[in-house]
Amino acid sequence: MKPAPLTCHSPTTLDEAVRLLHDLGPEAKVIAGGQSLVPVLNMRLATPAHLVDITGLPGLDEIRVSAEAVEVGALVTHRRLEQDDAAHAALPLLRQALVNVAHPAIRNRGTTVGSLAHADPNGEMPMILALTGGSVTAASVRGERTITASELFVGPMETVLEPDEILVSARFGRFAEGTRTAFTELTRRSGDYALAGAALALQVSDGQLRTARMGFVSVTELPDALDLTELVAGRPASTSADIAEAVVERVTEHIAPESDIHATADYRRHLTGVLARRLLTELTADIPARGA
Ligand code: FAD
């Protein structure tokens, strides 16, 4: 199918873009990489009268690494972020997750910030924003505002963004010293959306577990992060197998998977427990028992 007739606008400054969105009203939609929006338009699941193409806006294609965060401009593609060595050194979880987003051809056009605006709980990057305690910056004719990940996502594919706001950047928070991270997911075919996925940020020092946060893909209503610190704090890393049961129990209580043509909710729940256990093992396997 093809999209319903629409008018495409190509502003050349951010001011012009936010003014257009404001003046055109809710009949206008932002388009960035088009990797989620174009299929939606082609299937006529949305029929906006206007598209505001932001790909010509200057200054939105930067990746900035600071002591606290990796900041990503709205036009940075998944692929560019995945391949950015400074971002990887600062926050390895970005690349660990990004290589699982669709196929390289889609990552070459799709933007990471666009995927946050799309707010699909089956997507990897909304969860990563939540897990890193990140935030986004939105611009409109009223100025700019910062929205934390916990405020941004309010439902599946639903955010607090107003129709006339453009996300100009996202800020993924860096983890504290000694934090190890890993990401894993299961898909029916490489590049598909995950049946279930999870990421773990585990802080370890002196052979002891300190903090733990886990995020999930495709099994929660909203992209969010589960704090598991009280289950792990002060435990020797070498005993992680002993706490795995409690972690799996907490995780399966927290998630709310649904059944669809690919998998039942029960299977997804079981799978997420397996992935959680796997992540814990992966991040502690090389830590010897104290005194060993
Ligand atoms: P667009 O498609 O241009 O826009 C998506 C939505 O976000 C629209 O509603 C648009 O209005 C809004 N938007 C975009 N940018 C902004 C902005 N700066 N400010 C305000 N609103 C904005 N994603 C995954 O996470 N995991 C996958 O496994 C995965 N698999 C895919 C497989 C296929 C076959 C396809 C086609 C896509 C897949 N995707 C997957 C989606 C892909 O990651 C998209 O690139 C991404 O979700 C959206 O980025 P985009 O730049 O293409 O946004």
Image (cartoon, rainbow, N blue to C red):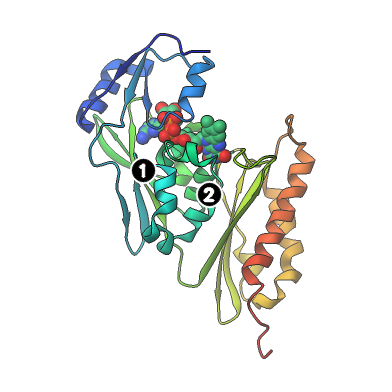
Nearest to N terminus: mark 2 or mark 1? 1
Query: What's the residue type where badge 1 is placed?
Result: Val
Labelled pair 2, 1 in contact (Cβ < 8 Å) = no
In the displayed structure, would residue 149 be above or below residue 232? above
Task: Give the left or right position of residue 270, taking residue 66 as reference.
Answer: right
Q: Secondary structure at mark 2?
A: loop
> Residue 116: horizontal and vertical position, in percent?
45, 39
Residue at 61%, 38% (x, y): give it.
193
Give the tally of numbered discs: 2
Residue at the extreme top of the image, as rendered = 5
How far apart, in angstroms, are the residues tagged by discs 2 and 1? 15 Å
The answer to whether the beta carbon of the residue marked 2 is less than 8 Å from any atom of ligand 1 is no
In the rendered view, would you say 106 is above or below 25?
A: below
Q: Amino acid at mark 2?
A: Val
Q: Is residue 195 left or right of residue 17?
A: right
- Answer whether residue 232 is visible to the viewer in this image: yes
**Most foreground residue, 156 or 289:** 289
Q: Residue at x 55, y 62 (%)?
A: 181
Using the rendered image of the protein, determine whether residue 156 is visible from the camera's viewpoint: no
State the SS at label 1. loop
The correct choice, above or below, for 114 with respect to 19 in the image is below
Q: Quadrant of residue 265?
A: top right
For the point 28% across and 41% down, the residue is 60
Q: Which label belongs to residue 261?
A: none
Q: Residues within 10 Å of mark 1 (few under 14, many from 20)?
A: many
Q: Which residue is mark 2?
A: 99
User: What residue sits right under mark 1 in the picture?
Assistant: 76
Q: Position of residue 254 (x, y in %)?
A: 67, 48
Across and down, in percent, residue 250 comes to: 70, 55
Q: Position of residue 135 (x, y in %)?
A: 40, 47
- Residue 191 placement: quadrant: top right
* On screen, residue 223 above or below 140: below
